[in-house]
Image: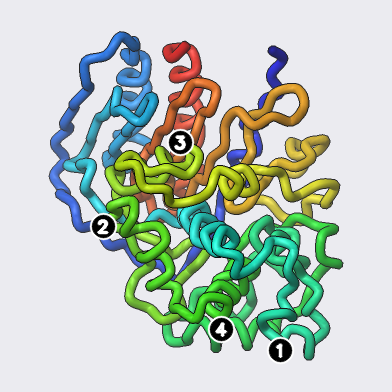
Amino acid sequence: MKIRVRSIIILSLVLLYAACKKNNLGPTSSTTTTTTTTTSYDFSAIDKVLNDSVPVKFGGNCYALICVNGQPVYSKGYGGYTADTRELIASCSKWLSAGVLMSLVDEGKLKLSDTVGAYLPIFTKYHKGNITIAQLFSHTSGFPGQSAQNYEGNPLLTLERATDSIAQNVPLIATPGTQFYYGGVSMQVAGRICEVASGESWATLFSDKIATPLGMTNTDYGLTLNPGIAGGARSTPNDYIKFLNMIMNEGVASNGTRVLSQNAVTMMEQGQTGNAKVAYSPYPLALLQNNADFYGIGNWRDLTTTGDVLVEDSSPGAFGSHPWVDRSRKVTGFIFTYVPVQGYISTIWTCLNVRSIVRTAVQ
């Protein structure tokens, strides 16, 4: 099987969610704790990588959790971090938000091909109504990544007020579908569409559609009425891995509850960027060329086989946390940390290295 690696795409993971503040509900001790479950897999190389990297690149704080077929096979904590430590997870939020969106697709309340104007007429008024929901969630809407006014990150606004302000005051920088510009503005608009289509608040939607059926009791988007759809969630390793295992299991939670349809998961993982030109990514653009359809609905499609069949996808965050799914090996993993300044730069190579070791160890 010829594999075409797009791991470089992972580095385009950043939404620098400037309005976010740290919320660490876990221990802060510098003591390292290690728990690795009995398994036939040799993960000693991961131990070495983390032992070398975490004190220097992760600020001493990290929790790594890896599952195979939904069962934990590796866990290790540093700096007092445990599986229940809670932190802001920045762009790891995008995957969770995509789950909310796809649950409404399952219910027939919206379609990815629907346009913004069908739900938010103010966008039609300002000549932005023809953007599709798929474009909003794949960074190809034509909007910039962030607004100069920070509407998407202003906790004093409501999601409705923020979205109306985006319609009125944030200009398109490209024709929808022609450019990839990573960020949070477009997903904020999509979040408001979800509210309008369902008649529920984003907080209620996330709780009802994702958190409650998965038992994610320590994950939310904060107390603001303007939740950061693209980067405002806070979670724990134990909670987030439940979401990843559901995605791996094509929409079914570990307790047997169907959270998303198999079709919804498939659509979420399909490439959405097409021939869109990369207009903004924190990673050098030269390394993104000739990689069509590298982004789906809220997740990076960073490893595929011949025929564009997805092998691995991910949704890393600006503060250094890094979740991924490896479909070929039934692996889910979450490297969890909080490095508030350039965390993605500090941790990305370690995370990619761990993923590479897992590919070798799990056959």
Instruction: Give how far apart the Cα atoms at labels 2 and 1 are.
Output: 35 Å
Residue type, numbered disc 2: Asn
Residue type, numbered disc 1: Ile
Q: Answer whether residue 18 is visible to the viewer in this image.
A: yes
Nearest to the eye among marks 2 and 4: give it: 2
Q: Residue at x 56, y 83 (%)?
A: 162
Q: Residue at x 18, y 26 (%)?
A: 35
Q: Residue at x 34, y 11 (%)?
A: 41
Residue type, numbered disc 3: Asn
> What residue does disc 3 label?
249
Q: Residue at x 34, y 35 (%)?
A: 56
Q: Quadrant of residue 171?
A: bottom right
Instruction: Give how far apart the Cα atoms at labels 2 and 4 are.
Output: 26 Å
> What residue does disc 1 label?
122
Q: Secondary structure at mark 1?
A: helix
> What residue does disc 4 label?
162
Mark 2 or mark 4: whose residue is earlier in sequence: 4
Residue 81 at x, y = what percent?
A: 21, 43
Mark 3 or mark 1: whose residue is earlier in sequence: 1
Residue 54, placed above or below residue 206: above
Residue 333, placed above or below residue 207: above
Q: Secondary structure at mark 2?
A: loop
> What residue does disc 2 label?
218
Residue 323, placed above or below residue 328: below
Q: Are marks 2 and 1 in contact (CB under 8 Å)?
A: no
Left or right of 39: which side holds 120? right
Q: Are marks 2 and 3 in contact (CB under 8 Å)?
A: no
Mark 2 or mark 1: whose residue is earlier in sequence: 1
